Amino acid sequence: MCLATLVAAALASAGTGAAMIGPSQILQLLADPLGSDLGIETEPWHALVVPIALLPMLARPLNALLLGEREALHLGVSTQTASRAAIALCAVAVRGAVAVSGIIGFVGMVVPHAVRLLTGPDHRWVLPGSMMLGAALLLATDLVARTAVLPAELPIGVVTALIGGPFFVWLIRRRRDWG
């Protein structure tokens, strides 16, 4: 039920953000909390280089963890080390991404699920696929945000919430049908 509340809140936030289209000064003030690339500074990008380089190296240990902790241990994976490394690298990547563009909801949740639906659970495909599809999704949503209500510009978080909310509603309904 908590995920449904999150989806509803994000859709309501997207609707509120879309309804507040007005002068560029107001949009500038709203852009940061809803995610934007207005005024991007290049310095935080260095925080993304290390996780992007190292996360694919964790694909095999993460695949072993999909089998369960005991099975991963039998395969020689230090589950605690792999888990901590994955969490630390993801935290650094999220910090860098938020520092660069602000909070842009749903991309980090929608993209990995979509990639898993397309490729299966193998992290050798999920990790690089998520990076590529995430970049493509942000380029597409940025294009929509910049052109949908010309001459104004929607905050990109509004567009991603309008994609992410329905996607998670569909995902929840799909899982209910299975089980």
Image (tube, rainbow, N blue to C red):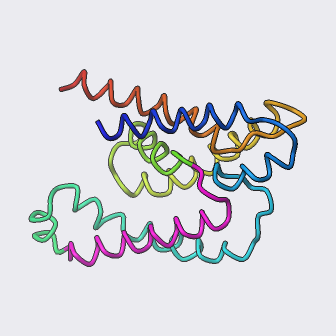
Q: Can you give x and y, in whole percent of width and height, for residue 95 in the image? A: 54, 69
User: Is 85 one of the magenta-colored residues?
Assistant: yes
The answer to whether 91 appears left or right of 172 in the picture is: right
Name above or below for residue 103 compared with residue 145: below
The residue sitting at 63% across, 44% down in the picture is: 157
120 and 49: which one is in front?
49
* Residue placed furthest toward the top: 177
Q: Can you give x and y, in whole percent of width and height, for residue 145 in the image? A: 75, 38
145 and 81: which one is in front?
145
Q: Can you give x and y, in whole percent of width and height, for residue 13 in the image? A: 57, 38
Name above or below for residue 162 compared with residue 126: above
Q: What stretch is highlighted in magenta?
A: 77-104
The residue sitting at 52% across, 65% down in the picture is: 94
Q: Quadrant of the C terminus?
A: top left
Q: Can you give x and y, in whole percent of width and height, for residue 25 in the image? A: 85, 49
The answer to whether 106 appears left or right of 38 in the picture is: left
User: Is 81 one of the magenta-colored residues?
Assistant: yes
Give the overall secondary structure of the magenta segment.
Answer: helix
Q: Quadrant of the N terminus?
A: top left
* Residue placed furthest toward the right: 151
122 and 159: which one is in front?
159
Name above or below for residue 58 compared with residue 37: below
Give residue 175's quadrant in the image.
top left
* Total count of labels: 0
The residue sitting at 80% across, 46% down in the picture is: 26
The residue sitting at 11% across, 63% down in the picture is: 71
